[in-house]
Image (tube, rainbow, N blue to C red):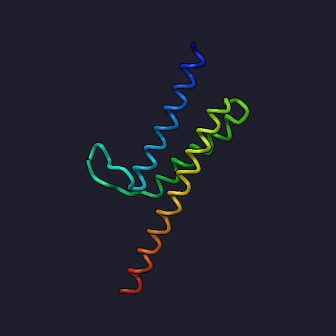
């Protein structure tokens, strides 16, 4: 019973950081301001926290928990690279127009 609760809480924690990172990348609206906001530094921090959790829990997670965390990290990192690239291209475009 306690193990099931802990598994559920673990998934909820990971999804909280996933939602935060997606919001920080501008992929989801900020529910408080109801606006799309981007902060890639905060996104990197959210991803770093999940990376740390993966490292610190290595060998202590079930296969499902480990697979879930790895999948979320992979998705977030791919989206982060995509958003970083867009930001760099936008900055380059502004420089050439100046």
In percent of width and height, residue 43 lies at 48, 52
Can you say whether 22 is above or below 90 in the image? Answer: above
Where in the figure is residue 91, as x and y percent of width and height?
Answer: 42, 75
Q: Seen from this angle, which residue lies furthest left?
A: 34
Relative side of 36 to 56, left or right: left
Residue visible at 32% across and 47% down?
30
The vertical placement of 95 against 9, above or below, is: below
Q: Which residue is drawn at 49% across and 31% down?
A: 12
* Left or right, residue 43 beside residue 56: left
Closer to us: 90 or 1: 1
Estimate the x, y position of residue 50 in percent, counting from the top left. Answer: 57, 43
Q: Quadrant of the C terminus?
A: bottom left
Q: In which quarter of the image is the N terminus?
A: top right
Q: What residue lies at 51% left-to-right and 47% top-to-bottom?
A: 46
Question: How many tags in the picture?
Answer: 0
Vertical comparison of 22 with 12: above or below: below
- Residue 42 percent across, percent down from the top left: 46, 52
Q: Residue furthest top?
A: 1
């Amino acid at each position: 019973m306690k193990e099931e609760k802990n598994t559920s809480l673990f998934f909820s924690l990971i999804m909280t950081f996933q939602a935060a990172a997606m919001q920080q990348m501008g992929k989801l609206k900020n529910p408080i301001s109801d606006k799309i906001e981007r902060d890639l530094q905060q996104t990197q921090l959210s991803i770093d926290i999940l990376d740390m959790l993966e490292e610190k829990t290595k060998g202590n997670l079930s296969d499902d928990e480990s697979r879930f965390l790895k999948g979320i990290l992979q998705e977030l990192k791919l989206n982060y690279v995509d958003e970083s690239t867009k930001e760099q291209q936008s900055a380059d475009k502004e420089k050439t127009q100046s």
